[in-house]
Amino acid sequence: MNDLTWKEFERVDIRIGTVISAEDFKEAIKPAIKMTIDFGEEIGIKKSSAQITDHYDPKSLIGIQVAAVINFPKKQIGPFMSECLVTGFTQPDGSIILTVPQKGAANGSRLA
């Protein structure tokens, strides 16, 4: 892997937001969940889709905080427009565990 410069890393805007709604993404080719995430007053509400159904169901996501990249271009996924990329860690079986803070953080807080 090539090393990143600090300046390159700073361009990736990773923020904390609280999931305020979630539902199965029935139209997705691979099982996924659509989420609406509150990133606070400055950033607002954004939507995302994530293939996290191995470890999560929509009800279990409501109220949790997740880390997401908010400065990628929007991406059309079937009938859904994803506005941010929720981050997670790939497990040996290919499933994803969400990136969440150990303690509550203010919505919109930037990864430092």
Image (tube, grey):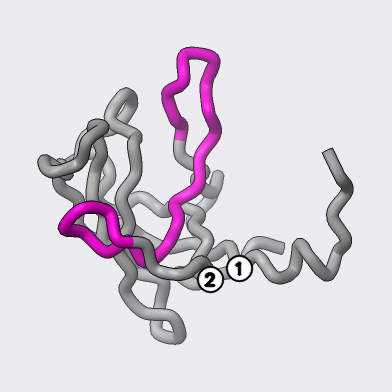
Along the viewing direction, whichever of 78 and 56 lies nearer the viewer: 78
Apparent side of residue 69 relative to residue 80 in the rendered image (left or right): right
Span highlighted in magenta in the image: 76-97
Q: Quadrant of residue 58?
A: top left
Toward the viewer: 110 or 6?
A: 6
The disc placed on residue 13 is: 1
Q: Residue at x 45, y 55 (%)?
A: 85
- The residue depicted at 61 percent of the width and 68 percent of the height is 13
Residue 36, picture quadrant: bottom left
| Distance (Cα) linking label 1 and label 2 | 6 Å
* Residue at the extreme left: 26
Decide: few, some or many residues near mark 1? Use Cα within 10 Å; few <14, some 14-19, many ≥20: some
Q: Secondary structure at mark 1?
A: loop
Image quarter of the C terminus: bottom right
Q: Earlier in the sequence, mark 1 or mark 2?
A: 1
Residue 93 included in the magenta stretch of the image? yes
Question: Quick one: 34 or 60, which is closer to the camera?
Answer: 34
Q: Looking at the image, do the residues carrying marks 1 and 2 touch, with CB atoms under 8 Å apart?
A: yes
Q: Residues within 10 Å of mark 2 (few under 14, many from 20)?
A: some
Q: Image quadrant for the N terminus?
A: top right
Residue drawn at x 53%, y 28% as measured from the top left: 90
Horizontal and vertical percent for residue 87?
50, 47
- Residue 84 sits above or below residue 1 on the image: below
Label 2 sits on what residue type?
Asn
The disc placed on residue 5 is: none
**Which residue is painted at 36% across and 62% down in the image?**
75
> Mark 2 sits on what residue?
71
* Badge 2 element: loop
Q: Is residue 84 left or right of residue 29?
A: right
